[in-house]
Amino acid sequence: QVQLVESGGGLVQAGGSLRLSCVASGSIFSINVMGWYRQAPGNQRELVAAVTSGGITNYASSVKGRFTISSISRDNAKKTVYLQMNDLKPEDTAVYYCNAVVRPRDYWGQGTQVTVSS
């Protein structure tokens, strides 16, 4: 089993920044992909950003231009993934979930609330 614990969410004004962290624990040999998804009320869960064990990143089109290539990063030794979010907008308000792919399974954290006020 893999457990994921997120931290770093909160309330921030538009234009502000937050840094999310997610630590994985359990019997893990290697984590193939770690990433962040978000779900706003009434919406489906969507990918925000992900990074492979080799450092290849992928970002949702909705955050490109605001999140840089290094916004998502991971420390493989610490089994931790980070998401640096800058220039936040009210539409970024959602519950943010950490995801880890340990093939062939997906694991999810409990989520952390991010609220951006206008």
Image (cartoon, helix red, strand yellow):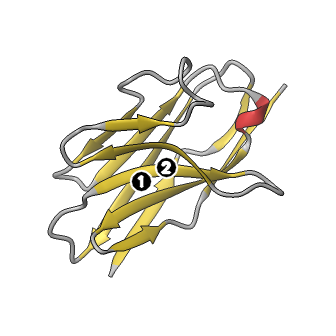
Residue 91 drawn above or below residue 10: above
Tell me the quarter of the picture where residue 107 sits: bottom left
Provide the secondary structure element on which disc 1 rests: strand
The residue wearing badge 2 is 36
Residue 7 drawn above or below residue 105: above
Q: Residue at x 74, y 22 (%)?
A: 14
Q: Is residue 83 left or right of residue 29?
A: right
75 and 103: which one is in front? 103
Location of residue 77 in the rendering, given as x and y in whole percent from the top left corner: 16, 52
For label 2, count other residues whose C-alpha is less than 10 Å away and answer few (under 14), some (14-19) or many (20+): many
55 and 96: which one is in front? 55
The numbered dot on residue 22 is 1
Q: Residue at x 55, y 51 (%)?
A: 37
The kind of residue on which mark 1 rests is: Cys
Location of residue 92 in the rendering, given as x and y in whole percent from the top left corner: 70, 36
The numbered dot on residue 100 is none
Q: Is residue 9 left or right of residue 108?
A: right
Q: Is residue 71 left or right of residue 29?
A: right
Provide the secondary structure element on which disc 2 rests: strand
